[in-house]
Image: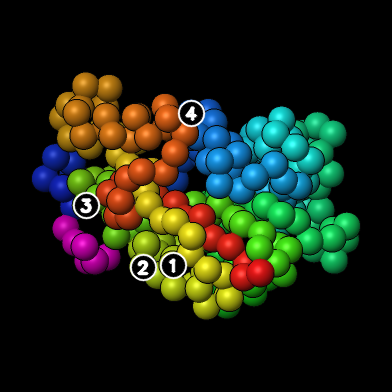
């Protein structure tokens, strides 16, 4: 699907809502993915905004945050008390084994991709062989196809293929890629909890793995690594 696709007939042609913050179930899934794919840390949560993911990572192992702004750093510290939070990558104590970047690319224009919080920064922050979990809204995904104008468009929308391309261009390797599935809704007139199309996403979250194919949901989800 491309960016010019028409809205779904199930909804009126209205301005898209703002992208929602990750819900607790999503954050819990990200933490389980980090434990399974990234190991025990140390973790660096990049570009976090409320501290929920950083706090979850801290329950697994040593964890710190890297914020894009002082305001974001303040929110991270409030949401994950006791976790060090930086606004400058040069103050990090050293490379990390594991990194998370959830929603970062949704706000980052192409001319800022080499910033500390962008893919170039992820490459520099990871130790050789280190891995990252990257999540970004998929502008070419099934959820946008179903919702049309009601899809919560991020500030910088990109499709899965473009997200993958930017990550590879930064020197990182793709280990695994998939989707979060149809995990929000409603995607039509049926309530989300009764819509069978949401069942695969619920199952994926419940087992704490990445099983759904790219393009099948709301967001692109990728496990990447810095070459050893």
Q: Is residue 183 above or below residue 161?
A: above
Mark number for residue 145?
3
Q: Main secondary structure of the magenta part?
A: loop
Residue 113 vs 40, above or below: the answer is below
The residue wearing badge 2 is 161
Write down the residue under mark 4: 25
2 or 3: tag closer to the N-terminus: 3
Q: Are marks 1 and 3 in contact (CB under 8 Å)?
A: no
Q: Which residue corresponds to mark 1?
A: 164
Q: Residue at x 50, y 73 (%)?
A: 168
- Which mark lies nearer to you, 2 or 3? 2
Badge 4 density bin: few <14, some 14–19, many ≥20, Cα 10 Å: few
The numbered mark, 3 or 4, whose residue comes first in the sequence reads: 4
Q: Earlier in the sequence, mark 2 or mark 4?
A: 4
Height in image: 1 above or below 145?
A: below
Q: Nearer the viewer, mark 3 or mark 4?
A: 4
CA separation in Å, label 2 and label 1: 5 Å
Label 2 environment density (alpha carbons within 10 Å; few <14, some 14–19, many ≥20): some
Quarter of the C terminus within the rendering: bottom right
């Amino acid at each position: 699907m491309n960016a010019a696709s028409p809205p779904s007939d199930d909804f009126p042609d209205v301005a898209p809502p703002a992208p929602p913050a990750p819900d607790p179930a999503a954050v819990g899934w990200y933490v389980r993915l980090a434990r399974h794919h990234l190991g025990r840390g140390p973790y660096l949560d990049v570009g976090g905004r409320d501290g929920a993911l950083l706090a979850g990572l801290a329950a697994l192992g040593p964890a710190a945050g890297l914020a894009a702004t002082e305001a974001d750093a303040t929110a991270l510290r409030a949401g994950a008390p006791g976790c060090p939070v930086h606004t400058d990558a040069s103050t990090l104590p050293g490379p990390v084994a594991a990194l998370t970047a959830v929603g970062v690319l949704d706000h980052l224009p192409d001319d800022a991709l080499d910033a500390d919080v962008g893919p170039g920064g992820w490459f520099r922050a990871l130790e050789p062989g280190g891995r990252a979990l990257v999540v970004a809204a998929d502008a070419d995904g099934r959820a946008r196809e179903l919702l049309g104008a009601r899809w919560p468009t991020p500030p910088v929308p990109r499709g899965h293929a473009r997200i993958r391309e930017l990550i590879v261009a930064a020197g990182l390797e793709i280990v695994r890629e998939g989707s979060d599935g149809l995990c929000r809704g409603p995607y039509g007139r049926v309530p989300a909890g009764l819509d069978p199309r949401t069942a695969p996403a619920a199952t994926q979250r419940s087992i704490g793995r990445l099983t759904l194919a790219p393009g099948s949901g709301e967001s692109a989800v990728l496990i990447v690594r810095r070459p050893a």
